[in-house]
């Protein structure tokens, strides 16, 4: 039985939130696995920043600048423990998913782990009216990013953004 409530919201300065993010950023899969086993419900938790916006442990795993140690394995561990790869940031001007963040860092291996875990996800769970239209603004402006290409290679019609965003990957409908 979990001592953590469903829909858990952790202040980013709280010890368990700091330990979780530190393990994710360090790629410490042993500590992360132990923490998630001891606290079911932690993987899908929201980590709430000082200004009230919240992200998830998967966002921490895809954080800028990307290429965190053991990134793909960390993503797989979090998803296996209940993290939802389709959940967006809340309470900010954007509504990006972990895949948006992996793509914006061009972290192809982490993007692949997210795509493989949720092959049908194409859009965020919800979209803020002010959300940017592209998961990879600079990459799509340049034409194509490796992460976006990876998504197209796995059968997506786009890199998770509406066709008008400039993503040239995949067939147009």
Image (cartoon, rainbow, N blue to C red):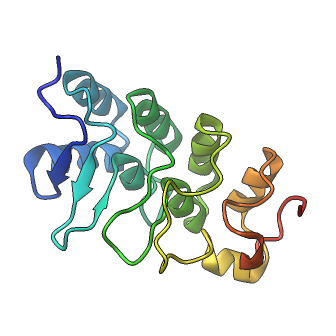
Q: Nearer the viewer, residue 46 or 151?
A: 46
Q: Position of residue 83 (x, y in %)?
A: 40, 38
Q: Residue at x 9, y 51 (%)?
A: 14
Q: Is residue 136 left or right of residue 159?
A: left
Relative to 56, say whether 74 is above or below. above
In which quadrant of the rendered view does residue 84 lie? Answer: top left
Q: Position of residue 25 (x, y in %)?
A: 34, 50
Q: Nearer the viewer, residue 158 or 140?
A: 158
Q: Residue at x 46, y 55 (%)?
A: 62
Q: Position of residue 9 (x, y in %)?
A: 19, 49
Q: Residue at x 65, y 53 (%)?
A: 122
Relative to 139, say whether 64 is above or below. above
Q: Nearer the viewer, residue 127 or 115?
A: 127
The image shows a total of numbered marks equal to 0
Q: Is residue 132 left or right of residue 83?
A: right
Q: Residue at x 73, y 52 (%)?
A: 151
Residue 36 visible within the image: yes
Q: Is residue 118 left or right of residue 78?
A: right
In which quadrant of the rendered view does residue 3 lie? Answer: top left
Q: Is residue 73 left or right of residue 89?
A: right
Relative to 81, say whether 53 is above or below. below
Q: Position of residue 96 (x, y in %)?
A: 48, 64
Relative to 13, say whether 6 is above or below. above
Residue 166 visible within the image: no
Q: Assign the N terminus to one quadrant of the image.
A: top left
Of all residues, the one furthest to the top in this rendering is: 1
Q: Assign the C terminus to one quadrant of the image.
A: bottom right
């Amino acid at each position: 039985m979990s001592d953590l409530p469903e829909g858990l919201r952790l202040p980013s300065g709280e010890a368990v939130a700091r330990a979780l993010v530190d393990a994710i950023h360090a790629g410490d899969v042993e500590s992360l696995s132990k923490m998630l086993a001891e606290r079911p419900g932690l993987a899908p938790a929201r980590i709430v920043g000082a200004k009230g916006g919240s992200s998830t442990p998967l966002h921490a795993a895809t954080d800028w600048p990307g290429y965190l140690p053991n990134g793909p394995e960390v993503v797989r561990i979090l998803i296996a423990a209940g993290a939802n790869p389709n959940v967006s940031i809340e309470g900010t001007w954007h509504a990006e998913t972990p895949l948006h963040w992996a793509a914006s860092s061009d972290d192809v291996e982490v993007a692949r782990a997210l795509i493989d875990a949720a092959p049908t996800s194409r859009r965020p769970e919800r979209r803020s009216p002010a959300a940017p239209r592209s998961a990879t603004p600079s990459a799509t402006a340049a034409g194509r990013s490796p992460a976006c290409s990876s998504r197209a290679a796995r059968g997506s019609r786009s890199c998770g953004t509406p066709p008008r965003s400039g993503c040239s990957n995949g067939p147009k409908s």
